[in-house]
Amino acid sequence: TLLRHGHRQLSLLRPRTPFAGTLEVAACLADATPWLREHGMAVTVREHESSTSGVGTAVGGLLGSQSRPTALIAMLPGDALSALGHLHARGVRVPEALSLVCLFDDPYLARLTPAPARYACDPAGFVRRRARQLVRLVRSGVRPAPVAVVPEFIRGGTLQPPPGTSAH
């Protein structure tokens, strides 16, 4: 999504204290780094203390860096909310000057203006599929296949091509 929009300088906000899924995302990003470089993208991972001020310090450091990002990826919904507040306080318009994408959804994100671009999963659907597999396992003894969780991208209002580009 970010590559299609023309973003080449990405920054990932990663909490220093690991939460469910954050270590896996960081590992996937490390595995994808050669491909990203090959396609002209640079990714900076900025760890932060899991607090509003910790996110603010990380955002401030990224904005002042030599390779200022055109898109910010927040791993957690609370970090996306903190990042939006700190960007607003610094006069950085989202998405006009910087795009923001959150890797996980939370119902309150839909209430923001602009609502962040984000990825959402259907936990009830996942539980239903796993429950059916469990019943099958108990009845037949057949080991279930893994269940893939494919998140849905919710466009929101925080994603657009970087300033000075015409990518779509």
Image: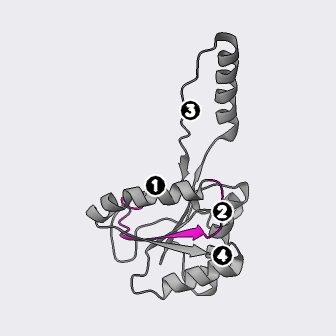
Which is more toward the observer, 143 or 89?
143
Residue plotted at (38% across, 68% down): 7
Q: Distance between the residues labelled 3 and 1?
A: 19 Å
The amino acid marked with disc number 2 is Pro
Residue 37, quarter of the rendered image: bottom left
Query: Which residues are drawn in magenta?
Result: 1-20
How crowded pointer 3 is (Cα within 10 Å; few <14, some 14-19, many 20+) is rated as few
User: Mark 4 or mark 1: which comes first in sequence?
Assistant: 1
Asked which colour scheme the image uses, the reply is: one colour
Which comes sooner in the sequence, label 3 or label 2? 2
Q: Name the residue under label 2.
A: 77
64 in the magenta segment? no
Label at residue 73: none
Type of residue at label 1? Cys
Q: Residues within 10 Å of mark 1 (few under 14, many from 20)?
A: few
Task: Locate residue 89, reporting x and y percent.
Answer: 64, 85
Res 168 → quadrant: bottom left
**Mark closest to the chain's N terminus, 3 or 1:** 1
The answer to whether one can see residue 33 in this image is yes
Between disc 2 and disc 4, the foreground one is: 4
Of pointers 4 and 3, the one earlier in the residue sequence = 4
Residue occupying the point 56% across, 73% down: 47
Give me the disc on residue 28.
1
Circle nearer the N terminus (2, 1): 1
Pointers 4 and 3 in contact (C-beta within 8 Å): no
- x%, y% of residue 127? 69, 33
Tag of residue 49: 4
Rendering coords of residue 84 (x, y %): 62, 74
Q: What is the CA distance from the residue labelled 2 to the residue labelled 4?
A: 15 Å
